Image (tube, coloured by chain):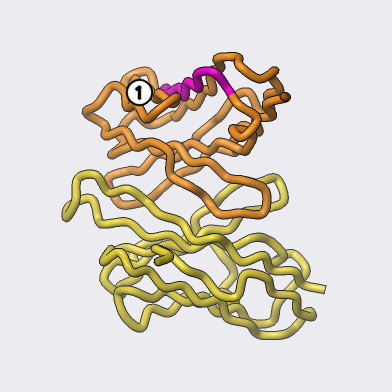
Amino acid sequence: KQEVTQIPAALSVPEGENLVLNCSFTDSAIYNLQWFRQDPGKGLTSLLLIQSSQREQTSGRLNASLDKSSGRSTLYIAASQPGDSATYLCAVKNNFNKFYFGSGTKLNVKP
Amino acid sequence: DTAVSQTPKYLVTQMGNDKSIKCEQNLGHDTMYWYKQDSKKFLKIMFSYNNKELIINETVPNRFSPKSPDKAHLNLHINSLELGDSAVYFCASSPSSRRKPRAEAFFGQGTRLTVV
């Protein structure tokens, strides 16, 4: 059974820092991996999607990498801003349309 | 236009009641999901439907019954609500992997259910 782990569980950084969020998964037979952002009391917003054949995806200040063989993905946030404060969730999709989520990293960017 | 919409956004009800949460997507996706997010923010899949057919049914009490009248809708009905059912329930949709390689998932805003 697929298990997804995210570390750290919480992260507090001053504004302007570059930071890395980690996601690991136990079964490398994934179809894709998706990073989401969740604001308090809100739904999930898709940030980046990486297909299993891809190594990385970039969108603005965000860069996500995928190393399928080692079961790892990282989300890199450059020049963090207070508006980046949220919980970041990693989800892997298997070949049977099922998504498995990590428990998230709660990020606080201090002004 | 909201891609995946859930109603209601908040639901407070007493133990023992029966309630429904509705979900609609206008993305033309053929797969829809229900997830439960517990107090520790962990998202766990409950059900998945593909073209109105149940394809994933995780270990949830049979008091929870999904219904998909058509491809664009997946409603969740809960009988005899219990205190432990309090959580945020998220609906999601995606194209099936076979039909669209990208198969990105989109989520609704969630329904915060509180059972008192």
**Chain identity for the colour yellow used in the image:** B
> Chain A shown in which color?
orange
Residue drawn at point x = 52 percent, y = 22 percent: A22
- B7 relative to B94 in the view: left or right: right
Q: Which residue is mark 1?
A: A66
For the image, the number of numbered tags is: 1
Dot 1 alpha-carbon crowd within 10 angstroms: few under 14, some 14 to 19, many 20 or more: many
* Rendering coords of residue A32 (x, y %): 31, 38
Q: Main secondary structure of the magenta part?
A: strand
Magenta residues, start to end: A72-80
* Rendering coords of residue A47 (x, y %): 43, 38
Residue drawn at point x = 60 percent, y = 78 percent: B78
Quadrant (top left/top right/bottom left/bottom right) for the N terminus of chain A: top left
Q: Kindly indicate the quadrant of the structure image that contains residue B53.
A: bottom left
Whether residue A77 is in magenta: the answer is yes
Q: Which amino acid type is marked by label 1?
A: Leu
* Rendering coords of residue A12 (x, y %): 71, 23
- As drawn, the residue found furthest toward the left would be B99
